[in-house]
Image (cartoon, grey):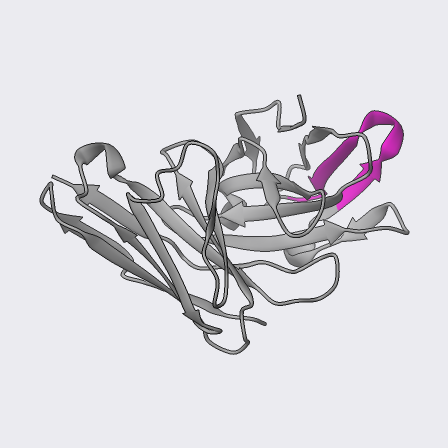
């Protein structure tokens, strides 16, 4: 079945440490790929997106993500996490038109 | 950037009442709006897609008579939860996009927390 998988339900990191959130998809073609962040009780904010070209994309708030076709992955990274980064992170894909398919999310806790 | 306003942000009402949620695109014309439902600690599930001036397309398993969607203008879509019951309690999020070829960017509202007593 076609899906978007975020293997880590919850991740805890120390402030200042590096972060990597995993995302895998299982579709025949390369979809458009996105990472969103959601603070409690809020909507979603787009962090970054990949359409084509350079497989390392830069986003807002110091985040970046790397598309690896061979692994069907689009992992999100940040070199140094800030306490304000604590939130829920969703990976999403668009196959055609504009229908988004979201992963189940990864909850990030940042400890001082 | 593009702004989508969703109102109300939170609503509490008695079982059996109908609740209307508004989604407005403030600085662009939204040809397409989407309605999602999110249960606690879960991802967003697409409920329906609505194009301005036409009937909404509902995802499988979503009751169209239960969740009425109207997209009468390019800046406003409404979701009405009819005869709401406690199991309808959830976080509802709208998003809006405009026509830009294959990829139509989606901009999300801040969501509506619906609690049915």
Q: Is residue B68 above or below residue A73?
A: below
Q: Position of residue B111 (x, y in %)?
A: 38, 53
Verify whether residue A110 appears in magenta: no
Q: Position of residue A72 (x, y in %)?
A: 80, 29
Position of residue A62 in the picture relative to residue B57 (left or right)? right
Position of residue B63 in the picture relative to residue A73 (left or right)? left
**Residue occupying the point 51% across, 46% down:** A83
**Residue occupying the point 12% across, 48% down:** B17
Quadrant of the frame with the C terminus of chain B = top left
Foreground residue, A7 or B62?
B62
Foreground residue, A79 or A99?
A99
Residue at the extreme bottom of the image, as rendered = B27
**Residue occupying the point 28% across, 48% down:** B113
Q: Is residue B24 visible?
A: no
Query: What is the magenta range?
Result: A65-80
Position of residue A80 in the picture relative to residue A67 (left or right)? left
Q: Position of residue A104 (x, y in %)?
A: 53, 30
Verify whether residue A77 appears in magenta: yes
The mark total stands at 0
Foreground residue, B76 or B12?
B76
Dominant secondary structure, magenta: strand
Q: Quadrant of residue B42?
A: top left
């Amino acid at each position: 079945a076609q899906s978007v998988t975020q293997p880590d339900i919850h991740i805890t990191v120390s402030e200042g440490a590096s972060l990597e959130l995993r995302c895998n998809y299982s579709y025949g073609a390369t979809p458009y790929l996105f990472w969103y962040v959601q603070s409690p009780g809020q909507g979603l904010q787009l962090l970054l997106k990949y359409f084509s070209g350079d497989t390392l994309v830069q986003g807002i708030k110091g985040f970046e993500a790397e598309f690896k076709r061979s692994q069907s992955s689009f992992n999100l990274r940040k070199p140094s996490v800030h306490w304000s980064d604590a939130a829920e992170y969703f990976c999403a894909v668009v196959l055609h038109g504009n229908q988004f398919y979201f992963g189940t999310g990864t909850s990030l806790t940042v400890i001082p | 950037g593009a702004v989508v306003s969703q109102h109300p942000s939170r609503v509490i009402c008695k079982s059996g009442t109908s609740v209307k949620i508004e989604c407005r695109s403030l600085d662009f014309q939204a040809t397409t709006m989407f309605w999602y439902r999110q249960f606690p600690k879960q991802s967003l599930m697409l409920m329906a897609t609505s194009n301005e001036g036409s009937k909404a397309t509902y995802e499988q398993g979503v009751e169209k008579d239960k969740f009425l969607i109207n997209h009468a203008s390019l800046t406003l879509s409404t979701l009405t939860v009819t005869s709401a019951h406690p199991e309808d309690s959830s976080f509802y999020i709208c998003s809006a996009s405009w026509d830009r070829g294959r990829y139509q960017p989606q901009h999300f509202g801040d969501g509506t927390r619906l609690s049915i007593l």
